[in-house]
Image (spheres, helix red, strand yellow):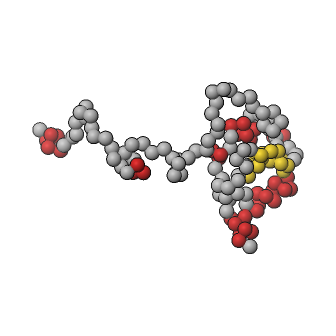
Amino acid sequence: MLLFIKRLFAWWDGATLGTLLTIAKHGRKVGEDEFGNIYYEEKKPGIYNQKRRWVTYKGYADGSRVPTEWHGWMHHTFDAPPTEAPLPRKAWEKDHQPNLTGTIYAWHPKGALANNGHRPHATGDYEAWTPDEAKS
């Protein structure tokens, strides 16, 4: 029962019941990425003679969790999905990483509150303003 209620309302943690029904009626599975996200395409072309494309996320729904090759396919940059025509990888390319902002893995600079809030002292090229100097 809890899973049913979650599917009705919890769009941020997987697909809702409405999305799953739409995919079952109008879509076909195209592939899956290394993160477990599943990609679908509309069976028949819709408006403008173009097929709609969907992704159902495994876990939290975050657009930055879509790898580059699937992002290009989702936005109709590539006609064939990466399962049929994989993108060639360059030697200098790094593996895809989702945006970590707002998570415990986010980068925090020195002096940030998440890093104990200690900043280095001024280096001597900074002169603090005081209100007494402004009066003269």
Left or right of 84? Residue 61 is left
Q: Quadrant of residue 109?
A: top left
Left or right of 112? Residue 30 is right
- Which residue in the rendered view is the most extreme toward the bottom? 1
For residue 78, above or below residue 13: above
In depth, the one of 135 and 40 nearer the eye is 40
Question: Which residue corresponds to the image point at 79% horizontal and 58% vertical from the top-left?
Answer: 20
Query: Residue 133, how many percent across, how many down?
Result: 15, 40
Q: Is residue 75 at all visible to an observer of this figure?
A: no
In depth, the one of 128 and 100 nearer the eye is 100
Left or right of 17? Residue 96 is left
- Which residue in the rendered view is the most extreme toward the top? 91
For residue 5, above or below residue 90: below
Q: Quadrant of residue 98?
A: top right
In depth, the one of 118 and 134 nearer the eye is 118
- Which residue in the rendered view is the most extreme toward the left? 136
Quadrant containing the N terminus in the rendered view = bottom right
Query: Residue 57, how many percent across, how many down?
Result: 70, 52
Query: Residue 135, how many percent across, how many down?
Result: 13, 41
Quadrant containing the C terminus in the rendered view = top left
For residue 2, above or below residue 80: below
In the rendered picture of this protein, how many numbered marks are placed on residues? 0
